[in-house]
Image: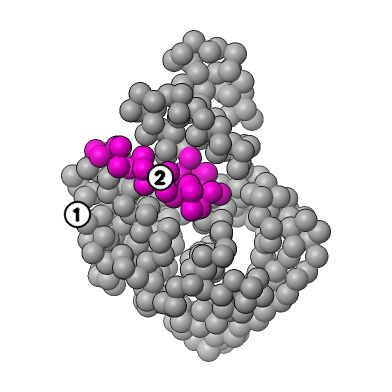
Amino acid sequence: WLREGLADMLIANLSRSDKLTVLSRIQLHSLLERQDLAKDKITLEQAKEIARQSQAEYFMTGSFAKIGEKIRLDVSLYDSNSANLQATETLTVEKTEQILTEIDLLSLKISNRLNSPPTDKNNLASVMTDNLEAYRYYSLALEKAQALQNKEAVELLEKAVALDPQFAMAHARIGYVYSISIGLSEKGKPYLEKAFKLSERLTEKDRLSIKAWYEIANLDFPAAIQTYREIIAKYPLETESYWRLGRLLDGEEKSDEAIEVLKQGLVIDSAEKNIYNHLGGIYSRFGKHAEAIAAHQRYVA
């Protein structure tokens, strides 16, 4: 689980700088899965290609090894255009359970290399959780949720909040699974309300996401549309937000606006299958068969 968990920790930490736009774990996983690389070791050329597709200026690769009780982390930072090595950083953690506190130092070194120190001074342990086992359950749950294994995801997230009742994003993710993935709004709302109460330490991006999920759970779609517009304005590389906003606009019978938003998402990621799928559906309803077929063919590809 550390393979994705460590990457997620670095993403969460680097996202605390308002000078950096960092690809989310979900979007990164989508790009890896698309190239059948989600479970494989990634070569430098493959990493460069993924960075190019996501329009990132820089990308990182890394490795970790356990030596007795210690864990050594090695990270390399590359320029996406040339794939030239920009920096390397190493961190040795004395005990596994100290990763959540020690990885802040590694993230700080990387963000300083990019001249983008964190704006938010809270560390990862306070933003997410200081319980590594709870974080492990959370990380594994996201993997299950991405595979649409919602029951397993909720079970893992429940274990996370049992270990750390203050784990805001774990509460939020349970609410998301119930309210958004399954459509059981009433069951999801208490978890989202709990996450709201605990969200003051979270990044702005996470707070906005929770706000949007809660508005959808309350069937307040106009408010959710505004929140997703705000997310896209501040974090323009998040293709899931274009898809969510497009679906909401379409549901509010604003299909022309939905099409434009979905097209904007394809500018960011020209192979995002969910966007193509929904765009094809809108075209089909309006009798634009050529456009629908083109979108469907791109989705299948």
**Which scheme is used to colour this image of the protein?**
one colour
x 36%, y 47%: residue: 227
Identify whether 269 is placed above or below 172.
Answer: above
Q: Would residue 195 be seen by someone viewing this image from the given angle?
A: yes
Neighbour tally class for label 1: few under 14, some 14-19, many 20 plus, Cα within 10 Å: some
Q: Nearer the viewer, residue 41 or 247?
A: 247
SS at badge 1: helix
Residue 173 seen from this side: no
Task: Give yes or no for residue 239 being in the magenta stretch.
Answer: yes
Q: Does the magenta stretch include residue 149?
A: no
Residue 164: image quadrant is bottom left
Q: Quadrant of residue 66?
A: bottom right
Where are the magenta residues, as a range?
A: 219-242
Q: How far apart are marks 1 and 2 (CA)?
A: 21 Å
The answer to which of 55 and 1 lies nearer the viewer is: 55
- Mark 1 or mark 2: which comes first in sequence? 1
Q: Which residue is denoted by mark 1 in the rendering?
A: 190
Query: Disc 2 on helix, strand or loop?
Result: helix
Residue at 46% across, 24% down:
256
Give the amino acid at mark 2.
Tyr
Q: Which residue is drawn at 30% across and 37% down?
A: 222
Quadrant position of the C terminus in the picture = top right
The percent position of residue 235, horizontal first and vertical second, equals 51, 52
Q: Name the residue under label 2.
A: 228
The residue shown at (64%, 49%) is 54
Q: Is residue 191 left or right of residue 203?
A: left
